[in-house]
Every structure is written in C-alpha cells, then in structure tokens.
Image: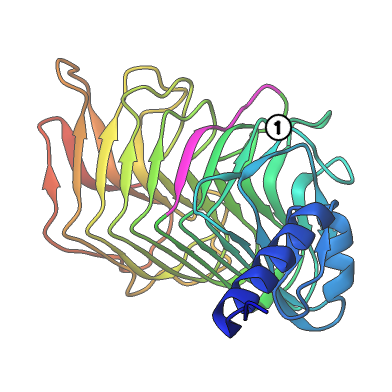
Amino acid sequence: MKMISTALLLSAAITVTAFAQSAGGPFTVSETGQSFRSLADAYRAVGDARGTIMVAPGTYRECAVQEQGDVTLRAARPGTAILDGVACEGKAALVLRGQGATIDGIVFQNIRVPDGNGAGIRLEQGNLSIVNSLFRNSEQGVLTGNDPRASIIVDRSTFRRLGTCEQDCAHSLYIGQYGSLTVTRSRFDQGTGGHYIKSRAPRVNISGNSFDDSAGRQTNYMIDLSNGATGTIRDNEMVQGRDKDNYSAFITVAPEGRTNSSAGLVIENNSASFVPGLERNSTFVANFTNDAVRIGANKLAQGIKVSDKR
C-alpha cells in the first residue's frame, strides 16, 4: 500500500478548510475561522468582544452597524475590498457605535443618502483608527458624532472626490466634539464641496499630509478648526485650486466660536500655493480668536498672507 505523507495530508486539510471558508462567505472572523456571506452577520458574530473581520477581495453592496465590541475590519489584500453604494440607517456603509473600531485597507465609494450626508463611515461613539484606506465619490468620507473621551487616528489614507454643499455642507472628513484627532501621511484631493478637514476636537495633530485642491470644485478650507484647538499642523503640502466656494484662507481657527483654547497651537513647516497660472490673494491662517497661535516658518507662495485676525 502506498503511504501518504503527513505533509500532503496537512496540505489537503488546509485546501479543504480554505475552500470551506470561501464557500461560507467573504467575511471571516479571524478568531473563530467562521465565514459569513453578510458583513452585518460577521459584525454580529464578534458581538461584545475584540475581534477581526477579514474581507476577501471583491466589490460588495453591503453595509453594517457595529453595536458593541472592539472590531477590526481588514482587507485580506489592501485596496481590493470595496464597500460600494449601500448605506445602513440612511447614514453610511459602516455605522460604528461600539467600544472601538479599526479600519485597515478598505475602499468606501459611491455613498449617497437623502439628507446629503452619505459617508463611508458614520462614527457615533468609541475610538476609531483608519489606516491605508480609500474614501471616494461620496457625500462625505467620515462623519462623526461627539465623544469627548475618545480619539480618532487616520494614517496613510486617501479622501477623494468628497463633499457637497447642495443641502447643508458635507466634508471629506468631519470630526465632532471628539477628544483628539490625528491625521498623518494622508492625501486629500479633488474635493466636490465643503472643507477637506473640518474638526471640533480640542486637540489635533495634522502632519505630513497632502491637500491637492487643483482639481477641486466649489471647495472651502483645507483645514477648518471650527471651535479652535491646540496641537500641531506641520509638514503639510497645500495647493489651492481655481474653483472655490471660499478661497479666503487655507486654515481657519474657531470661525464658529471659541469653544476650545487655541493658545499654543503650532503651525509650522507647511507649504501653501496656488495652481500654476493662478493669481489671487488669500490668507494662510485666519484666526477668529485672540489666542496666541504660534505660526512658525512656512513656505507660502506670492499672494498668500501669513495670517489675519477676523
């Protein structure tokens, strides 16, 4: 009788298991190995625990609500797992109100809802970390509620063709009264209305990003600290385009009222310019408070005033 090696048996077992998971569905809970055809079912399976849902490559007309737990949603291959065109609760592809959430390598696209606030992610409470993800062709990228005890981190992600002011304004990234906001090594471009970043968080770190408004239309500010903030805005590159709803400033501090102190906010080592051939006047930092914002050395093109008091 011919003997079958242990290695071959193991290889066959792995193949059968992989096929069974694939047959079960594209959303797999890593901790249990269970696979689901529905993203919502995968979130329910994690429940009030810490877990990771792996998403197989594909375009999914799916949405989900995270009610509890601390859940990571991760693409098996970054950029190949796409949530397309479906919003839960008339809000977003993902509605998050658990203890915390991590989004890794997911694409969100084509989200629109009747009230004009269709987002890739609607964050209602809890910490959120977004890495290596893409938000495009929607009314908003990320829209949050208020959770002063929690933090939001965005790293190595892209926000493209987002925003609208057809009803109330929607933005590429809108942060409510969260404890802190960190945005690093990310790209914002081709906006279609509103601001690229609008934040009411009292503490910010916005560093090492690109704001390319050259193909934007009817956009406003690159960074709007609506109620003021402390922290840093550093090492960002900003290019203002021709088609603006408001080109009067690149960064604003507390244009909607000073709820948070901005004393000691540091803005340094950024570059700001216009698209080639465009001549106009603008202000780099428009300060609507009497707080002593620290504006260090920044590279500003001709026509851009360092700051003004409004």
Instruction: Classify residue 208 as left or right of residue 13.
Output: left
Say whether residue 40 is magenta: no
Dot 1: few (<14), some (14–19), or many (≥20) neighbours within 10 Å?
few
Say which element carries label 1. loop
* Residue 3 appearing in the image: yes
* Residue 66 appearing in the image: no
Residue at the (30%, 46%) spot, across then down? 210
Residue at the (83%, 75%) spot, across then down? 46
Q: Quadrant of residue 263?
A: bottom left
Nearest the camera: 105 or 258?
105
- Residue 159 in the image: state x and y as whole percent: 48, 42
Nearest the camera: 39 or 175?
39
Nearest the camera: 133 or 100?
133
Nearest the camera: 11 or 90?
11
Q: How is the image coloured?
A: rainbow
Instruction: Classify residue 227 as left or right of residue 270.
Output: right
Relative to 236, residue 182 above or below:
below
Relative to 150, residue 199 above or below:
above
Q: Quadrant of residue 310?
A: top left
Instruction: State the count of labels.
Output: 1
Instruction: Classify residue 88 as left or right of residue 196.
Output: right
- Residue 275 in the image: state x and y as whole percent: 21, 24
What is the magenta range?
157-166
Label 1 sits on what residue type?
Asp
- Residue 88 in the image: state x and y as whole percent: 85, 45
Quarter occupied by the N terminus: bottom right
Residue at the (69%, 74%) spot, across then down? 30
- Residue 267 in the image: state x and y as whole percent: 26, 62
Q: Which residue is mark 1?
A: 168
Q: Residue furthest front?
A: 1
Relative to 136, residue 245 above or below:
above
